[in-house]
Amino acid sequence: MVVAFGVVLLVAILISGFAHRTVLSTAVLFLVAGFVLGEGMLGVVSLQAGDEQVSAIAEVALFVVLFTDGQRIGVRDLARAWRLPGRALLLGMPLTFLISAVLGVLLLGLPWVEAFLVAAVLAPTDPVFASAIVGRKEIPDRVRGLLNVESGLNDGLALPIVLILVAAIGGPEIEYGTLALELLGGVAIGVVVPLVIALLLRLRFLSATPLYSSLSPVAAALIIYGVCNATGANLFLAAFAAGITIASVAPEIRDAFAEYGEFIAELVKLLAIFVFGALISPSVLTDVPILGYVFAILLLVLARPVAVEAALIGSGLSWQERATAAWFGPKGFASVLYGLLVLASGHPDAEHLFHLIVVAISLSIIAHSSTDVPIAAYFARHESSGRSMEEVPGEPPPDVAQKDGTPP
């Protein structure tokens, strides 16, 4: 697997310049390569959905990306720009969830509980793939900020619903008090650890060289990851909260670490896509009926676009910005992790439900990873033509790396 990933990475490096200018996506390259080299095809990479390393890679990838994405916006930026992400999270996400569930019942004949479970698993947007748009400076800052905050927080918001519904179909029982503590504990750990590190770095009797100071976010990430795994606190909320805290209390450390962080996040993201591709065998694809593919397509072109457009009515965004935010809701590793919970639930249809989830994620990766360049090019032409878009309050996040790790 390591050799295969290295070879695919080399190919991606060699074509990255071409991919950056066209609809060709390196994310799709890794997805297809994983599929072809997986056990269902050539058998070079032997992985199963229940393997521990699969869950570990998906978990680490989501943690790293949330941690680095969180560093793009501080508390002050978040407070000023909360209005738009708030609409997407508090109105757009529930509407997406409801529309998706109705589609599952009408198209697939799923019982309501199963339909709501699949909808909850697929409701979160993924920061790994949202970074393809968030990382492009051609996209208006307020759209990037909206997608960045939304994708960072909706994973944690969806988790309680997923756990409750997994328990409802026969999975392990949950204690709601414990679940609340896990969510709050994740946020607390994500805030406290960076604060302590920032205070230690400012003590006069201690000193750190610039090189080692720039590694302090790595120390924070390792501590947070270990503490969350030891205590059961929510790892993903901790990661995003830690990134925001670092951006708020130690922006100089954030800036020094930014380049390393982007490289690490990109590498982990590509590995996770490669592994996910290896899980998709022909048997998985054939287990999903035609209406299952129609369901997955309608999730992309109907459920989220309608929900987010409705949520952003009266927001002050131009129609182009609303359309971009509504379209770009990629499914990804949070959905994979939540799908694995469904697979392990013991429900008689758990495997079939997981296959539906896999197909929806795969189509989302292909669609969203192939449309960021045309969308960015449209906004670049729009700006160069001198037609400015209507401004709304909110300070933008700082420039971040573009698709495939290219600096802005």
Image: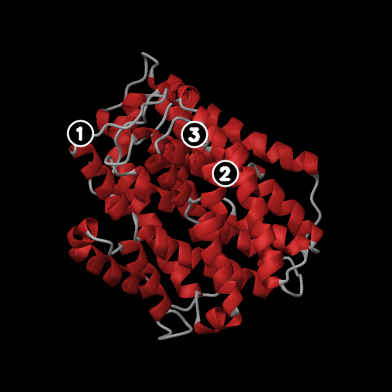
Which mark is first along the chain, 2 or 1? 2
Which of the numbered marks, if any, corresponds to residue 242?
3
- x and y, in percent, of residue 179 in the image: 73, 43
Residue sitting farthest toward the bottom: 42
Colour theme: secondary structure
Which mark is first along the chain, 2 or 3? 2
Specify the amino acid type for callout 1: Gly
Q: Nearer the viewer, mark 3 or mark 2?
A: 2
Q: Residues within 10 Å of mark 1 (few under 14, many from 20)?
A: few
**Is 117 left, or right, of 3 in this rendering?**
right
Which of the numbered marks, if any, corresponds to residue 154?
2
Specify the amino acid type for callout 2: Asn
Query: Which residue is pictured at 68% across the width and 40% down the height?
Result: 182
Visible residue check, residue 225: no
Looking at the rendered structure, the secondary structure element under dot 3 is helix
* Residue corresponding to mark 1: 386
**Viewer-side residue, 173 vs 122:** 122
**Viewer-side residue, 342 vs 254:** 342
Specify the amino acid type for callout 3: Ala
